Amino acid sequence: MNELWKRPTRMALAALLSLVLALPAYAQTREQARRIHDRLAGVPPTESVLQAMTNASQASHAICTAKSVSGAACAAYIAMEDPSFYNVTLKNFAAPWTNREFNVFVPLNDYIATVIGLIRDDSDFRTVLYADVQYIGQPGTVNANVSGSNNTHYEQLEAGNHNLKDVLVRRTQSEFNGLPSNAAAGVITSRAAAEAFFIAGTNRAMFRFTMVNHFCKDMEQLTDPSLSPDRIRQDVSRSPGGDSRLFLNNCVGCHTGMDPMAQAFAFYNYNDATGSIEYTAGNVQPKYFNNDLNFPQGFRTPDDSWTNYWRNGQNRYLGFYGPDNGEGIGAQSLGRELAHSDAFAQCQVRKVFKAVCLREPETTTDHTNFDQFVANFASSGYQMKKVFADTAEYCMGQ
């Protein structure tokens, strides 16, 4: 009798133990799904979304079927359907690129909206630096029309908390800022970037901040004193303070690469009085001749042609492979040259890794996976959501 009683008890205990052992695995899957959603959207998922993400290994969700993904990758794509991925995560992701202080707390603008739109549409993200493209709110969404002289349209989109995933539409930038289509260069010639980097100065700021934001390198990391100084402008003294060693040791290494490429911006300016970008086709902006008596024998900018000296020398590791072969005319072709490089792709992946994993790649495993993410980015046609999905999957247990 006792043996008969013990047998079902043992069976019940075994079943209960199996259930207990199964629960942590299920809970862990839910926790990882929740973490993926938190990292990508910045908000907790609803129960229905969490359930869909947890069962994502079955690829039952429409977005996962469309992307031919399953498991954690599917969960990541589901998370990126949340409006907060666009209104918060991507807005904060791109905002620091639009100002000299790298401030995330800036209003929505044409630069940020264009980055969000290109990512949403799975566009080739390299075009962010050279396409005639601008994303705007669908007509009728807000009262203010898009203007080349103010930011009101975008500020109203943000103030109204409109779902950017739904309301952004792609247009040509030249429609709004008056540039010829072949002078529009993606975010480089956006109103926000012009206001920050084309105002006053010598337009070197636009080049420097493009390096910082899209190569993840400041000029000190790109110095190469071995290159020819023949394109260094007149405003750079060859003996600052009467000491030529300062030029040879501190100045020449940056300017040998920067000045020949910043020449692409010779026709651009930001007019603070009108609040808009200016383009003087065929006429070099007077700012290029500021302080030209510092070294009259220096290079005097005649036009907007540019040359990429970094295709040779110690910066050739940046991996330029674009169709312009290191020479061109104007900002659009320069943007294409910069975007078609290994450094550009690596930088985008690095920024996403930091945004999603909340740290830089550190370990050998990190770097191995980082390299794979860069390769996946390229093979996807440079779709940024692929990078977000890969990175979220990798860091979901951290």
Image (tube, rainbow, N blue to C red):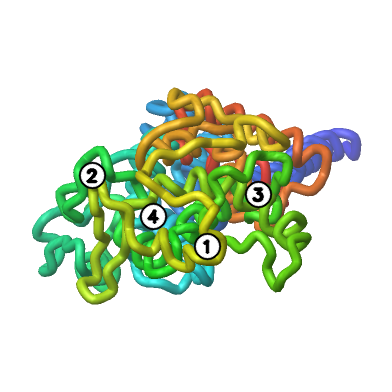
- Disc number for residue 27: 3
Q: CA distance from mark 2 to mark 4?
A: 15 Å
> With respect to residue 151, does 296 lie above or below?
above
Give the label, 2 or 1, closer to the camera: 1
Q: CA distance from mark 2 to mark 1?
A: 40 Å
- Disc number for residue 86: 4
Q: Secondary structure at mark 3?
A: helix
Q: Nearer the viewer, residue 263 or 295?
A: 295
Q: Nearer the viewer, residue 154 or 192?
A: 192
- Disc number for residue 235: 1
Mark 2 is surrounded, within 10 Å at the Cα level, by few (under 14), some (14 to 19) or many (20 or more) other residues, namely some
Q: Residue at x 46, y 31 (%)?
A: 327
Give the label, 2 or 4, closer to the camera: 2
Q: Amino acid at mark 3?
A: Ala
Circle 3/circle 1 CB separation < 8 Å: no
**Mark toward the start of the polypeptide (2 vs 4):** 4
Mark 3 is surrounded, within 10 Å at the Cα level, by few (under 14), some (14 to 19) or many (20 or more) other residues, namely few
Q: Amino acid at mark 1?
A: Asp
Circle 2/circle 3 CB separation < 8 Å: no
> With respect to residue 367, does 135 lie above or below?
below
Mark 4 is surrounded, within 10 Å at the Cα level, by few (under 14), some (14 to 19) or many (20 or more) other residues, namely many
**Mark toward the start of the polypeptide (3 vs 1):** 3
> Looking at the image, which residue sits at the far front?
297
- Disc number for residue 154: none
Q: CA distance from mark 1 to mark 4?
A: 43 Å
